[in-house]
Image (cartoon, grey):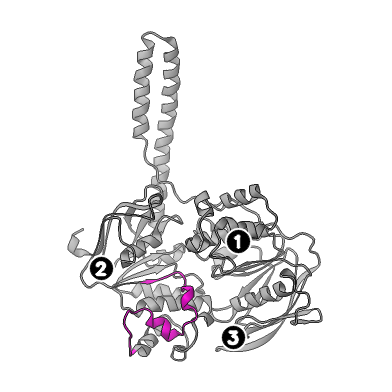
Amino acid sequence: MAREESVIRFEEVKFEYGHNKPILDEVDFALRRGMKMAVMGQNGAGKSTLFALMTGELTPESGEVHMSHGMRVATAAQVIPRDRLELTVREFFQKCFTEPIYDIDPRIDEVLEVVNLEHHQKLHDRIVKSFSGGQQARLLLASALIQNPDILLLDEPTNNLDTAGIEHLTKFLVEYPKTVVVISHDADFLNAFTTGVLYLDIFTRKIEQYPGNYHDVQRDILMRIEKENRKNAQLEKKIQENKDKANFFAQKGGKMRLVAKKMRTEVEEMEEAKVDVRKEDRTIRPFTIPAQDNLGGTVLTLTSYTVLKGRKPVIKKANISLRKNQHLLLRGPNGIGKSTLLEAIARGVADDFFVGNPTSKNRVGNEHISDASQSRGKVTLTAASGLKVGYYRQDFSTLDFEQTVYKALEHAMGKPDEERLRATAAGFLLSADVMQTKIGNLSEGQKGLVAFASLVLERPGLLILDEPTNHINFRHLPVIAKALDAYAGTMILVSHVPEFVTQIRIDEILDLEK
């Protein structure tokens, strides 16, 4: 590839966090104008670091990141930073620029229309945190587009998006004429528009560049791994045979020792000839989320809830009665109030039972009225006494970001059990180093694994899951789906990933749009 053709080029780039945490080692690759590349790699391999090096947020320890003159780079991050959730939409977009933009309103309208955010003309003064997860995903994309970048970086852009949102985003990227680099675990989404893959190997810390669509590259990598494994297996067999012979001849003494020495030399040569096999993403171990003991009969009854219709709250009657071992799926488009409803249910149960406040003023007879998110999520429900809630939130805000992973898991477990804690953490690939890391310093994917490990240790009677596939490596999803399918407590699930939902037993569906 001619250098003048590339819009960005990495040349022997090396990067590490501190002295004991190398991420990239002498990485070389180049991207041409108009390329649309997927980034593959295990959680912690350095995908987000790669983006930060492209934007200039991070500087290589050695090597060079060359950018064509005048190239603008913008990133649509995974999540909106917490310190920007209280901003208005107008303030949020102003933060995308180092200098004030005085004609920003028409520019905001233009990008909000591109990302298909309804009623965008009326949103400028709305607080960012009032948007649903899917709507915030659209805001993140719009915040990158408003910068008119030549290189667009997308970090898990389909998280929280409903089917219509993913379809709109896919169509936009197919038609988008500029360079795109995207991190995503949604294989079908990537396959629809990408023309190549940057593969980050967490073990070699190298990046390999492959042409072709996502599925083709995946297949090629797997075929290569199988071939390398077969070659190594053959060598391993021969190595062991020579070792056995060398030991035998060595015991004979005399001239046989020379034969043994020669055979050991051959063994060393064969060891060196072994292929450095790519170690693919490890998958979390199969796990079970134990259900709270001593729960019988009806666990939760929902008699009313609130949805949003044209941004106006509408109270709906319901007749949802969930017993132990029953699973409820909540459906509806982005912005209708699914997450707010889950929050209201969690609060309604936790306020009176889990936290231990039996005299709550929200109690009306046996009914519990909960209010979440500025009076937009009122529910009336009845819950079993002593019900424990396990809550997987989109933004992981049930976790204390200042705690270490170890302390968070210890807190979730309640009664100390060091052996169980360590075993559970290991099953979710939470290494000793990760266990001593503050949750706020983890990748989003690692936070998700901590959240699931916490649920295992909590033993909840009611499991509330809001988009549990977000940020999670696709290799882990079948394992997670199997655990949720087998969960013996009461479960309420929100997910926009049909393939994932089909793997889980669903006993009842509540469609908020109907």
- Left or right: 370, with 102 as reference point: right
Q: In which quarter of the image is residue 361?
A: bottom right
Residue under circle 1? 503
Of pointers 2 and 3, the one earlier in the residue sequence: 2
**Quarter of the picture holding the C terminus:** bottom right
Element assignment for label 3: strand
**Amino acid, disc 2:** Arg
The amino acid type, in three-letter code, at marker 1 is Gln
Under circle 2, the secondary element is loop
Is 278 left or right of 494, judged from the image as shown? left
The x, y position of residue 127, in whole percent, is 50, 84
Whole-angstrom CA distance, mark 2 to mark 1, is: 40 Å
Magenta residue check for 145 = no
Q: In the rendered image, which residue does mark 3 sit on?
A: 308
Q: Where is residue 81 in the image (x, y as percent from the top left)?
A: 46, 73
Mark 2 burial class by Cα count in 10 Å: few <14, some 14-19, many 20+: some
> Which mark is nearer the camera, 2 or 1?
2
Answer with mark 1 or mark 3, whichever residue precedes in sequence.
3
Whether 452 is drawn above or below 424: the answer is below
Q: Earlier in the sequence, mark 2 or mark 1?
A: 2
Q: Position of residue 17 (x, y in %)?
A: 39, 55
Say whether residue 382 is left or right of residue 431.
right
Q: Do the residues labelled 2 and 3 touch (CB within 8 Å)?
A: no
Residue that mark 2 sits on: 33
Would you say 286 lies left or right of 7 here?
Answer: right
Q: Main secondary structure of the magenta part?
A: loop
> Which residues, given as a range, are shown in magenta?
75-103
